[in-house]
Amino acid sequence: MKYNLQKSIIGLFLFGIFACQNIGGAAEVKNISYTELQEMQKTTNDLVLLDVRTPEEISGGAIGKSIAMDFYSENFKDQLNTLDSNKTTVVYCASGKRSMKTAVILKEKGFNKVYNLKGGYSAIP
């Protein structure tokens, strides 16, 4: 009985460790500032800027040659499949919330070099 109890406790402990690794997947995505993004644009050849704002939001301006994919569109996750997972991808939205959610999705899809623009488009000076 004592052996089975110890085994169960160890099993629960290990389960907790593995379960907690995926909690808050946002921790796997690095936030970068607009200044860091500007530096990346100068030094990274394979940089993709992904704008996940609505068309109305984008009409007020965008960063460089961004790829626009509306976070709220019905086929948003399917659109993400068109991106190259080997490229460095910086995601941004208006404030950083939708872009962080998108960055986590990209990480789950196997993208390794994914960054979130902290504060989104509204953080640009």
Image: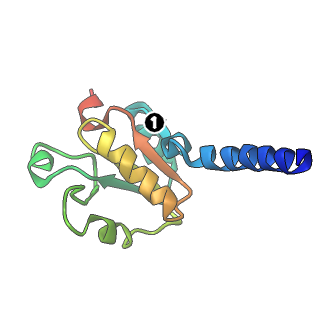
Nearer-the-camera pick, 20 or 105: 20
Nearer-the-camera pick, 111 or 109: 109
Task: Specify few, some or many for label 1: CA neighbours under 10 Å numbering under 14, 14-19, or 20 or more.
Answer: some
Find the residue positioned furthest to the right: 3
Tell whether 112 sits left or right of 7: left
Q: Residue at x 67, y 50 (%)?
A: 18
Nearer-the-camera pick, 28 or 69: 28
Residue 92 x, y percent position in the rendering: 32, 45
Q: Quadrant of residue 65?
A: bottom left
Examine the rendered structure and indicate whether residue 54 appears above or below residue 20.
below
Tell whether 95 sits left or right of 54: right
Nearer-the-camera pick, 14 or 29: 14
Instruction: Kindly state the secondary structure of the residue where label 1 is placed.
Output: strand
Q: Residue at x 11, y 43 (%)?
A: 60
Task: Give the colour scheme of this rendering.
Answer: rainbow
The image quadrant where one finds the C terminus is top left
Residue 47 x, y percent position in the rendering: 44, 56
Which amino acid, by three-letter code, is at mark 1? Ile
Find the residue positioned furthest to the front: 1
Tell whether 124 sits left or right of 21: left
Residue 73 x, y percent position in the rendering: 19, 62
Q: Residue at x 27, y 46 (%)?
A: 63
Q: Residue at x 21, y 46 (%)?
A: 62
Residue denoted by label 1: 32
The tally of labels here is 1
Q: Quadrant of residue 120?
A: top left
